[in-house]
Image (spheres, rainbow, N blue to C red):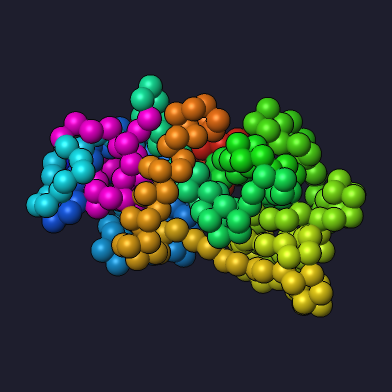
Amino acid sequence: MRAIVIRGPGGPEVLELRDVPAPTPSRGEVRVRVRATAINRADLLQRMGLYPAPPGDPPDIPGLELAGEVDALGGGVQDLAIGDRVFGLVGGGAYAEQVVVHERALARIPHGMGFEQAAAVPEAAVTAYDAMVVQAGLSAGDTLLVHAVGSGVGTMAVQIARAIGATSIGTARSAAKLERARALGLAHGVLPEAGAFADRVLALTAGRGADVILDLVGGSYVAEDARCAAVLGRILVVGLVGGRAANVDLSLVLRRRLRVLGTALRGRPLEEKIAAGQLLARRIAPLLASGAVAPVVDRVLSLDQAALGHEALHAADTFGKIVLVP
């Protein structure tokens, strides 16, 4: 099969299209003929040698999500059959024509949804739903603050919040991205000034603050999060593009009884990856099928254009997901 292989740590130029052996499914696993995958920041970090694949996943083939058709079954598979259209998350290896996945970590693609659209869903939607709803308990009437609202996770977060009756405030580095996010249900957009946004969020909420904050930036944003979180607010740190260190006023954490949680999908053990697959199947797929939530695809590239996709994502020159088609 063809796959994008990381030649060695470095820039986008280290991504090479090669012929490699096709994987064989073990017990409980299926092999999926990948029709589309998508680019995530974790792929960029892996390419640079900063985020190795979990044990058991291909160490040199990136790719965390996929959409395709089941083309081989391992022993004991009960829920899926050859030809089933599926999508889901993997620890790596999705920049390829075939990949092996545990059957229960996959979900069936909703009827009428194409592979390119489906590939833009798993990482963004599961990350947003798991963080906001499962871990932080976002519910109707709450206020959500989401950073990097034009990202794949951000665009999904806004739509999920709208679907469950929450109000969303988003930040982005450009007014154009905020305007596009309004079409997805964003109630208020904020352009941070020198990294500051807390005062504006407090003004938009009449001083109350945000109940849930989905922080895809990290760094100095976390200190601002604490300033504009509501009493009993929940801050979910999901990304660190703004840095790994934060100088937070812990007195705010104490006085407002805040919870600061860190979350990531890739390194979770198999049982938690299966739980993520079931979340995709039981909670997110119905939202897709009803039209309440829809994937946002910035552009579709061929697999051999993966380096171009990495360059675009690094430059933050995107709104939604970049999809790759083998």
- The N terminus appears in which quarter of the rendering? top left
Q: Position of residue 223 (x, y in %)?
A: 76, 66
Count of labels shown? 0
- Was residue 92 drawn as part of the magenta stretch in this picture? yes
Identity of the residue drawn at 38% across and 22% down: 112
- Was residue 109 drawn as part of the magenta stretch in this picture? yes
- The C terminus appears in which quarter of the rendering? top left
Q: Quadrant of residue 211?
A: bottom right
Identity of the residue drawn at 77% across and 77% down: 254
Q: Position of residue 244 (x, y in %)?
A: 62, 68
Residue 34 can be seen, yes or no: yes
Residue 168 can be seen, yes or no: no
Give the farthest residue toward the front. 140
Identity of the residue drawn at 81% across and 74% down: 255
Q: Is residue 221 left or right of residue 283?
A: right
Q: Quadrant of residue 157?
A: top right
Q: Position of residue 123 (x, y in %)?
A: 46, 47
Identity of the residue drawn at 55% across and 60% down: 135
Q: Is residue 141 left or right of residue 31?
A: right
Q: Position of residue 198 (x, y in %)?
A: 83, 56
Image: magenta residue range: 82-110
Give the farthest residue toward the left. 75
Q: Is residue 129 above or below residue 270?
A: above
Q: Is residue 321 above or below residue 237?
A: above
- Residue 143 vs residue 247, the one in the foreground: 143
- Residue 151 vs residue 186, the one in the foreground: 186
